[in-house]
Image (cartoon, grey):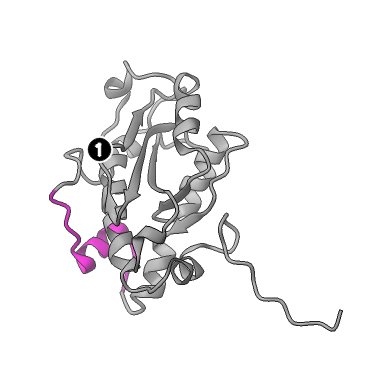
């Protein structure tokens, strides 16, 4: 895989407060440059949600209302997040979630494309018993020594782990077009157009 042919791409991860629909409590956006996660230009935001964090959600990511009490509300950072994401390609594990929630919080925002590392993993490793982020980390054993200290289920850590998994799986494909052919779900931006039957007119 020639990573120089890749368009600008951000690996993103979001964490919510556990309500339906969720308020965002953390966003991470990690650029991929020259085939590596570029932590020097990565961005992350903590957000104080309008509604309290549920006990279940706090038990997963550890972001309680006490932790978030001094963080900005979403309207205070929405324009900054929109500007950083711009129209760049995104990648995420189960990308439907990030695409849906970022789109709901940023009306009118649309990435150039959306790679789903869950879909990519199912195409790349066909016989695994599970395809969760934890299962893939165990199978692929990516280098996570430089991962943020926040730990699993925090957006910064999960984005870094997803980036390393994406790069490991991308090495199994020869070109960007081959990669996105299997990694972009049909109803998300960037999905290849299906071939049309030839006609006489």
Front-lying residue, 20 or 169: 169
Residue farthest to the front, as pictured: 4
143 shown above or below 46: below
Q: Secondary structure at mark 1?
A: loop
Asked if residue 53 can be seen in this view, the reply is: yes
Numbered range of the magenta stretch: 129-145
Q: At which x and y percent is residue 198?
A: 76, 82
Disc 1 crowd rating (10 Å Cα; few below 14, some 14-19, many 20+) is few
Magenta-colored stretch includes residue 171? no
Q: Residue at x 27, y 23 (%)?
A: 67
Asked whether 8 or 184 is in front, the reply is 8
| Residue 55 appears in the rendering | no
Expressed as whole percent of the image width and height from the top left, the position of residue 111 reads 53, 46
Residue placed farthest to the right in the image?
A: 201
Look at the picture and state if 60 lies above or below 133: above
Near-viewer residue (175 or 82)? 175
Q: Is residue 36 left or right of residue 191?
A: left
Quadrant into which the C terminus falls: bottom right
Q: Quadrant of the N terminus?
A: bottom left
**Number of numbered discs present?**
1
Q: Is residue 140 magenta?
A: yes
In percent of width and height, residue 133 lies at 30, 58
Q: Residue at x 49, y 54 (%)?
A: 114
The image position of residue 122, as x and y in percent, is: 39, 71
Report which residue position mark 1 lands on.
Answer: 40
**Residue furthest top in the image:** 70
Q: Image quadrant of residue 13?
A: top left
Q: Residue at x 26, y 57 (%)?
A: 164
């Amino acid at each position: 895989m020639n990573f120089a042919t890749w368009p600008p791409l951000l690996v993103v991860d979001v964490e919510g407060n556990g309500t339906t629909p969720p308020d965002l409590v953390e966003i991470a956006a990690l650029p991929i440059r020259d085939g590596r996660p570029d932590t020097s230009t990565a961005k992350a935001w903590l957000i104080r949600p309008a509604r309290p964090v549920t006990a279940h959600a706090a038990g997963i990511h550890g972001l309680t209302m006490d932790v978030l009490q001094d963080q900005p509300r979403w309207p205070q950072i929405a324009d900054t997040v929109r500007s950083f994401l711009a129209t760049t390609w995104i990648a995420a594990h189960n990308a439907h979630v990030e695409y849906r929630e970022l789109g709901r919080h940023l009306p009118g925002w649309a990435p150039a494309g959306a790679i789903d590392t869950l879909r990519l993993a199912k195409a790349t490793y066909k016989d695994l018993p599970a395809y969760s982020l934890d299962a893939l980390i165990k199978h692929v054993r990516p280098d996570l020594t430089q991962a943020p200290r926040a730990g699993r289920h925090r957006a910064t850590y999960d984005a870094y782990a997803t980036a390393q998994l994406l790069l490991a799986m991308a090495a199994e494909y020869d070109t960007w077009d081959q990669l996105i052919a299997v990694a972009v779900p049909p109803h998300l931006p960037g999905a290849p157009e299906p071939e049309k039957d030839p006609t006489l007119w």
